[in-house]
């Protein structure tokens, strides 16, 4: 059914008339006949009729409703195709979040995880395919992370995933999640290997440069039966809790290649040889470049990475800068374009070095040292006065007070010599000026080393700062995907939980790549101090912003009641707003309007 417009010119003025036309099938073929002449319509009237026609056309062939009976003499109850709706009874019910879970499921299919997981977790006697259960876990982790219990009890039912996956809410249980997680953990490596191939095909990823770093995540509770739970250096500043260590290998673009779950007391330097050998075993030996931060540095790791044709780029420890005081003080620095960084490239033996000096970091480190040095000088002067006035007489008490000051000012204590002498006791102190000036020269400086030749100073530096990609991956895993804290008491469930988070990060990174490729931006309102107004500033849109905006799109049932008391439920997806439509069009996606057939209540 559609509106047909007719035009007629009278007295030099064109008039437009409308008719409601319906297509019908006859023995002679399809024909069109006029259902009703509507006359002239203004803009609002035409729009209302168009909506009515659209509503009529969307009902489908299964239960098509006619706007008007073909013959007024036909009794309405005798013709099931003819119904009249009570407009006062139209309502909306069963509203659930849809847009973000629909996008997450699309990403799941886009990277091929549906086929990969189904291949490595085939369905046996289960009534629900394990791949669908894993998809539910990962989609939840991406959209609104919660525990398996909360997911099964209320989150799944509050979304449109049942319509998308066809898995009834009654089949989604906590025990089914746990059983599937146990199987998923055992299939980790083959799933990651297949996902690596898909990423390479989709995004033409270069695996010749790999970024490696570690982070930790703490447990809630004692986790006494968890063999992975141990106390160690906590990046979360939760030394009061046992933890687990996550080793992550990503590409220069940030796509995850592999991850390893290690005991919480694992030392950074002890993981390098283990992880590098594991990657070489899985993906073969090649002349790839390994980029790591200073926490991985030791004589043994450098020697290991220099063997078998391996190439590396490492940040050295801060203490190594002491051997390069001459280079720090001499000229020859090069300012990198569009960066507040000066660099100097040189070679010693077979090793290439890059000295880099960041101006913002230099100011920050100097300000921190200045604050601590002034604080230590002030408190030492007060302590000296107390000793001189006889208010602190015992040598042990004086030494204890000095120890407390050195503990309070760790960045300044190495630049002063404190002496206790005489009877009665006296306190004197002397500043190490030369050592202080040498420290000033090292402020804001980095020393990088590599056995890879042929890089320019800019390529050397920009390759190293790719490590910020791993740091961002850790922030997403912990803050957006809620990797921490870990509640699982068993090591296998802990490994599976981390794997689910890594798979969710793979979808997050895919969305991030697509958003950047589409050039999506959002306006950030910043206050202009001169005008005291909020000046909008365009910023690249983040995956978090995309998911948050699309989560407002709901799916639900339009409930209608006929004059005969019959109730109809039309399941529909809410129409996107202008902003949501802008996002979908930029990503070249089309939101469905309906997922299942309508039904009688």
Image (cartoon, rainbow, N blue to C red):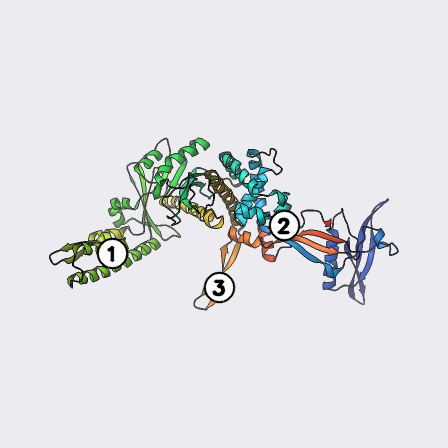
**Image x and y of residue 28, in percent:** 86, 44
- Label pair 1/2, CB-CB below 8 angstroms: no
What's the distance in space between the residues labelled 3 and 2, CA to CA? 33 Å
Tell me how far mark 1 sits from mark 2, CA to CA: 64 Å
Determine whether the residue tagged by mark 1 lies in a helix, strand or loop: helix
Q: Earlier in the sequence, mark 3 or mark 2?
A: 3
Q: Which residue is mark 3?
A: 535
Mark nearer the N terminus (1 vs 3): 1
Q: Tell me if 436 is positioned left or right of 33 in this view.
A: left
Q: Which residue is mark 2?
A: 591
Q: Residue 255: where, in percent of width, then height?
A: 48, 42
Nearest to the observer: residue 412 or residue 524: 412
Crowding around mark 2 (Cα neighbors within 10 Å: few <14, some 14 to 19, many 20+) is some
Q: Is residue 286 above or below residue 357?
A: above
Q: Where is residue 508 shown, x and y percent of the image?
A: 51, 46
396 or 466, nearer to the observer: 396
User: Given contact means CB atoms under 8 Å apart, are the residues at marks 3 and 2 in contact?
Assistant: no
Viewer-closest of 94 and 477: 94
- Numbered-mark total: 3
N-terminal of the pair, mark 1 or mark 2, is 1
Camera-near label (1 vs 3) is 1
Badge 1 is on which residue? 405
In front: label 1 or label 2 = 1
Would residue 405 be found to the left or right of residue 308 on screen?
A: left
- Which residue corresponds to the image point at 52% horizontal and 41% vertical from the top-left? 203
């Amino acid at each position: 059914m559609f509106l047909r417009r007719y035009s007629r010119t009278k007295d030099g003025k064109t008039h437009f008339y409308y008719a409601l036309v319906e297509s019908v099938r006859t023995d002679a073929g399809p024909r069109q006949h006029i259902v009703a002449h509507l006359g002239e319509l203004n803009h609002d009237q035409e729009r209302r009729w168009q909506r009515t026609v659209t509503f009529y056309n969307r009902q489908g062939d299964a239960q098509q409703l006619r706007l008007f009976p073909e013959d007024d003499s036909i009794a309405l109850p005798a013709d099931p195709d003819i119904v009249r709706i009570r407009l006062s009874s139209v309502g909306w019910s069963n509203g659930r979040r849809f847009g973000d879970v629909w996008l997450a499921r699309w990403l799941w299919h886009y990277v091929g995880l549906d086929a990969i997981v189904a291949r490595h977790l085939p369905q046996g006697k289960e009534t629900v395919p394990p791949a669908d259960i894993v998809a539910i876990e990962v989609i939840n982790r991406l959209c609104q992370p919660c525990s398996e219990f909360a997911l099964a009890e209320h989150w799944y039912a509050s979304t449109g995933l049942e319509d998308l996956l066809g898995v009834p809410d009654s089949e989604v249980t906590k025990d089914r999640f746990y059983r599937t997680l146990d199987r998923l953990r055992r299939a980790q490596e083959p799933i990651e290997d297949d996902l690596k191939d898909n990423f390479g095909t989709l995004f033409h990823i270069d695996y010749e440069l790999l970024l490696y770093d570690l982070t930790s995540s703490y447990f809630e509770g004692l986790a006494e039966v968890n063999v992975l739970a141990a106390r160690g250096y906590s990046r979360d500043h939760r030394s009061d809790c046992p933890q687990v260590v996550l080793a992550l290998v990503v590409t220069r673009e940030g796509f995850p290649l592999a991850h390893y779950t290690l005991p919480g007391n694992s030392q950074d330097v002890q993981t390098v040889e283990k992880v590098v050998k594991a990657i070489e075993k899985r993906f073969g030996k090649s002349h790839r470049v390994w980029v790591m931060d200073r926490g991985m540095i030791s004589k043994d790791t450098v020697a290991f990475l220099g063997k078998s044709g391996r190439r590396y780029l490492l940040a050295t420890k801060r203490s190594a800068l002491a051997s390069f005081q001459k280079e720090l003080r001499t000229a020859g620095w090069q300012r990198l374009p569009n960066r507040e960084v000066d660099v100097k490239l040189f070679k010693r033996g077979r090793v290439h070095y890059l000295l880099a000096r960041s101006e913002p970091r230099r100011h920050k480190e100097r300000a921190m040292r200045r604050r601590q040095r002034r604080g230590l000088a002030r408190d030492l002067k007060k302590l000296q006065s107390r000793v001189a006035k006889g208010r602190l007489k015992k040598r042990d008490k004086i030494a204890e007070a000095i120890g407390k000051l050195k503990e309070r000012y760790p960045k300044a204590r190495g630049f002063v010599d404190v002496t206790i002498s005489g009877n009665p006791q006296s306190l004197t102190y002397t500043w190490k000026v030369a050592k202080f000036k040498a420290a000033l020269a090292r402020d804001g400086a980095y020393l990088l080393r590599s056995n890879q030749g042929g890089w320019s100073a800019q390529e050397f530096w920009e390759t190293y700062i790719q490590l910020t990609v791993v740091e961002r991956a850790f922030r997403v895993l912990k803050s957006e995907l809620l990797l921490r804290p870990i509640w699982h008491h068993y090591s296998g469930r802990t490994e599976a939980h981390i794997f689910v988070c890594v798979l969710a990060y793979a979808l997050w990174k895919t969305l991030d790549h697509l958003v950047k490729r589409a050039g999506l931006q959002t306006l950030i309102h910043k206050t202009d101090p001169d005008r005291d107004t909020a000046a909008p500033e365009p910023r690249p849109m983040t995956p978090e912003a995309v998911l948050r905006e699309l989560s407002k799109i709901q799916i639900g049932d339009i409930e209608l009641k006929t004059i005969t008391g019959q109730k109809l439920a039309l399941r529909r997806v809410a129409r996107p707003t202008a902003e949501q439509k802008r996002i979908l069009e930029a990503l070249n996606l089309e939101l469905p309007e309906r997922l299942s057939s309508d039904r009688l209540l």
